[in-house]
Amino acid sequence: MRIVDLATADQDFIAEVEARSHQNLRTCYQCGNCTAGCPYTFVYDHSVSQVMRLIQLGQREVVLQCKSIWLCASCQSCTTRCPNRIDVAKVMDVCRHMAREQGYATEREVKLFTDAFLRSVERHGRAFELGLMADYVLHSGRVFTDVDLAPKALARRKLAFRPHAIVGRDQIERIFQRFRKGGAHV
């Protein structure tokens, strides 16, 4: 991790992450339990505890440009292990949303998949797996990625050729409308 100049602390960034996550980040004392429990630390450029510390130090650019926030699976291991009951996974989610809003996408494939997933949910009220896969392939160009899984999934009837009808689709639509108006913060 690089040396951080405390004079460059972006207090607005710290306040925004705290407000959007509803977490008091000052209570993090860097015990490392979050990092110890994280199954993806091996692929991160900054461990979970380092991301938390960088947020505390107001290092907006470093946090929003790091790969870790995009690779976080939101599995809640970090949150469950936190002795101060900080919802660390939510903090990581908030940082990912902020990075998206500010045009950072250090992990292009993750962003493309997330975009395809959200388009599927917006269109159908839930994920339509076959359509989601087609959308992702179209935007990513990864035509032959996991192509061997399709026949197995089809044989087990895990991929429908048409989206399922759901109850409450109008409620899902309202969530997306609220988001587009800027009223939804995770």
Image: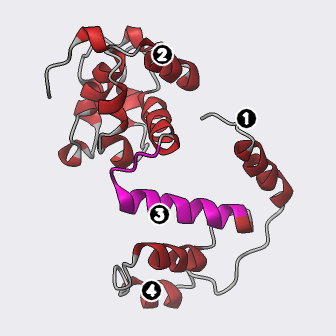
- Label 3 environment density (alpha carbons within 10 Å; few <14, some 14–19, many ≥20): some
- Mark sitting on residue 183: 1
Helix, strand or loop under label 4: helix
Is 59 or 169 nearer to us in this picture?
A: 59
Pointer 2: what residue? Answer: 12
Q: Are marks 2 and 3 in contact (CB under 8 Å)?
A: no
Pointer 4: what residue? Answer: 150
Q: Are marks 4 and 1 in contact (CB under 8 Å)?
A: no
Reply yes or no: does residue 80 show up in magenta. Answer: no
The residues tagged by marks 2 and 3 sit, at their Cα atoms, a distance apart of: 30 Å
Q: What segment is highlighted magenta in the picture?
A: 103-122
Is 47 or 36 nearer to us in this picture?
A: 47
Instruction: Look at label 1 and name its amino acid.
Output: Gly
Circle nearer the viewer, 1 or 2:
2
Of the numbered discs 2 and 3, the one sitting upstream in the chain is 2
Of the numbered discs 3 and 4, the one sitting upstream in the chain is 3
Q: Residue at x 39, y 50 (%)?
A: 105
Pointer 3: what residue? Answer: 113
